[in-house]
Amino acid sequence: MPRNIEELALPYLKHITPYKPGKPIEEVEREYGIKDSVKLASNENPLGPSPLALQALREAIEGINRYPDGGGYYLKQALAKKHGVEPENLVLGNGSNEVIELAARTFLSPQDEVVMADPAFLIYRLVTAALGCCQIMVPLKDFRHDLKAMAEAVSPRTKMVFVGNPNNPTGTAVEPEELETFISSLPEDVVLVLDEAYYEYLPIDARPDAIKHVREGRLILCLRTFSKIYGLAGLRIGYGIAPPGVVEAMNKIRQPFNVNSLAQKAALASLEDRQHLESTRAINEAGKRYLYEKFQEMGLVYVPTAANFILVDVGRDGEEVARALLPKGVIVRPMGGYHLPTHFRVTIGTPPENERFIQSLKEALAFSR
Ligand SMILES: Cc1ncc(COP(=O)(O)O)c(C=O)c1O
């Protein structure tokens, strides 16, 4: 018999609780013996992928006996054009999650200080805890990143700062000018990981342009993903935009075939489909207005969102309410892991999904009153 496995594993792992993803539809349906459930727990695109992506996948499927292009040549060409950068500025990942992890493993050693907001996307915390970093958590102010406090929290020991904009799980965004001030206040050798997974949901005038700082060589890693508005979460593909030196360093530890060939093809095709993006934004805006109205009618407090999900305070155990929704076939994300015990987070769905969610929520709340 081996020794206690916890003793053999890295010491930092002892305090880590594994990331709990949104419950998969299949699991809920199996557990409750139901069909046609709606998943509003992982901020996916309720319209599905672009038809152009599906067509590209059909055409690419025959070639999966081959390894993918480890350099992602065609996708990087297209992304470079889209963002006005060079292919050398781009690193592709198995989801933007992988790019977060690559960045952390590239730059951070045990005891290095990292600054992040609380609550923010849990992966920043998990990945840096696994490396034995010293985490400086800066509380949100009115559910938004307090960039002034974050700038003050940066010390000579700080190596990396994480900012999610819009932030998950609150859906809040910082003003572009606030971000500019923050960037100019950061010491030049601190890496800013700017997670823009929901960037495309922001209104045009609320979108910061951090890529211009990347072009100037600032230590910024902008993260984007195909999992959200592009509707390709299941394929796992995201990317980072950073100065070439940062990309080169990250490539040293990147698995050579980290992004599969189908994901690359579908992502490339998705970039062509402006209509799909517009429809997704439109359905998101309409769903947002509907849900706000219903929450107000129900007397529930919510955080106005800049993304495709809403943080709702149900004024009682959010975990219990989320659990009560499951047998009704509605999956939302409880927020206990984010120290928000009376909240849950719900993804904005299609109109029928939103209606079903509201009806089920009314029933669940009436029952638990
Ligand atoms: C803020 C934020 N960043 C990154 C991700 C990861 O996305 P992916 O790894 O699917 O690209 C998510 C997913 O929920 C997110 O909410």
Image (cartoon, grey):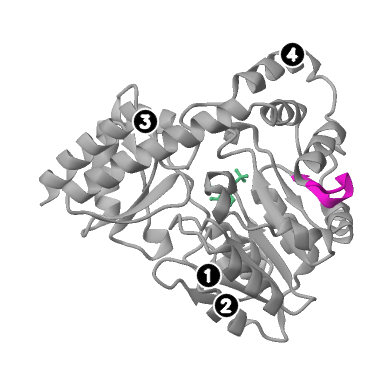
- Where does label 1 land, which residue? 117
Q: Amino acid at mark 4?
A: Glu
- Where does label 4 land, which residue? 59
Q: Amino acid at mark 3?
A: Val
Magenta range is 84-92
Q: What is the C-alpha distance between the residues marked 3 and 2?
A: 37 Å
Instruction: Characterize the local packing of mark 3: few (<14), some (14-19) or many (20 or more) Cα atoms within 10 angstroms.
Output: many
Q: Choose mark 4 or mark 2, whichever is in front.
A: 2
Q: Say above or below: 8 vs 306.
A: below
The answer to whether residue 167 is magenta is: no
Dot placed on the residue nearer the N-terminal end, 2 or 1:
1
Relative depth, front residue between 212 and 326 = 212
Q: Choose mark 2 or mark 1, whichever is in front.
A: 2
Question: Which mark, by number, is residue 38?
Answer: 3
Question: Which mark, by number, is residue 150?
Answer: 2
Question: Which mark, by number, is residue 92?
Answer: none
For residue 339, side relative to residue 193 (left or right): left
Q: What is the C-alpha distance between the residues marked 3 and 1?
A: 30 Å
- In the rendered image, is residue 173 in sight? yes
Dot placed on the residue nearer the N-terminal end, 4 or 2:
4
For residue 34, side relative to residue 4 (left or right): left
Q: Position of residue 156 (x, y in %)?
A: 72, 86
Q: Position of residue 27 (x, y in %)?
A: 41, 32
For residue 216, side relative to residue 95 (left or right): right
- In the rendered image, is residue 132 in sight? no
